Amino acid sequence: MAYQNLLSEVKENILYVTINREKALNALNKDTLAELADVIAFAAKTDEVRGVILTGAGEKAFVAGADIKEFSDYSGQQGQELAKHGHDLVFNAIENSPKPFIAAINGFALGGGLELAMACHMRIASDNAKLGLPEVTLGLIPGYGGTQRLTQLVGKGKAIEMITTASMITAVDAEKIGLVNYVVPQMDLISKAQEILNVIKQRAPLAVAAAIKSVVASLNETDGYVVEIEEFGKCFETEDFKEGVSAFVEKRRATFIGK
């Protein structure tokens, strides 16, 4: 996986993805989004990958937003196409991935950057991070799921406040309202994400994927309970279920193979 705007590496079943545009505060341009789409698809289809840590290069920014110059002269139709393309290939693709994604927010997460972090299944922020959706200062609204996912995470009132004021909040305040899972010193950011994924790696991969699908369905489906029931039933057909039950009865640690 050789990219121009990303660094990617699989180590011990974890895929590390770093948006590597430090001079541009890791802003999302078309090329970066295309590379993200590719690496997200790779993660989903590669058995070796059991989880993903997504972060930004340097200590200033996770992603400071989208590259505004690229769409400054777009028509309304072009704007809709831009949003739909990003939703389908990047933001929704992360949320719907069978592999858990953790955003390691190492600085500013603004606009499309916060939307990218919110698409991930979990978020860990360094104590210097600042988060916000400043789109209304440009005469826009969040277009990569920000109005929906922020509301899901923090509730309607706080979401409307953050979006309409365009105010940034600190990592500590983000944790208080449920926008991030943990706040840690920057030097501990990746190790905290590793700690969580190393626990998940011990669990049955197909069950983890089914759990993610069911939780996401609780927000996006007409009846998430139906999805949960279906996924629960499918788990009974897996070799991992048989191994998990045997290990429980035999009082030993299960060895899951993802089948």
Image (cartoon, rainbow, N blue to C red):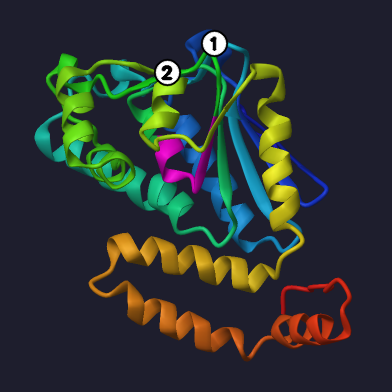
Q: Quadrant of residue 33?
A: top left
Q: Is residue 177 visible?
A: yes
> Residue 208: which disc?
none
Q: From the viewer's perspective, is 66 left or right of 121?
A: left
**Dots 2 and 1: beta carbons under 8 Å?**
yes
Q: Quadrant of residue 53?
A: top right
Q: Position of residue 48 (x, y in %)?
A: 76, 59
The verdict on residue 117 being magenta is yes
Which residue is drawn at the image coordinates 34% and 43% (left, top)? 153
Q: What residue is shown at x 77% (from left), y 61% (from top)? A: 202
Q: Quadrant of the C terminus?
A: bottom right
The amino acid type, in three-letter code, at marker 2 is Ala
Comparing 183 with 75, the one in front is: 183
Disc 2 secondary structure class: loop
Rendered residue at 22%/22% (across/down):
135
Q: Which residue is mark 2?
A: 64
Residue 228 place in picture, x, y as percent: 42, 77
Which region shows up in magenta? 116-124
> According to the image, label 1 marks what residue?
60
Work out whether 118 lies above or below 216.
above
Is 217 above or below relative to 148?
below
Q: Amino acid at mark 1?
A: Lys
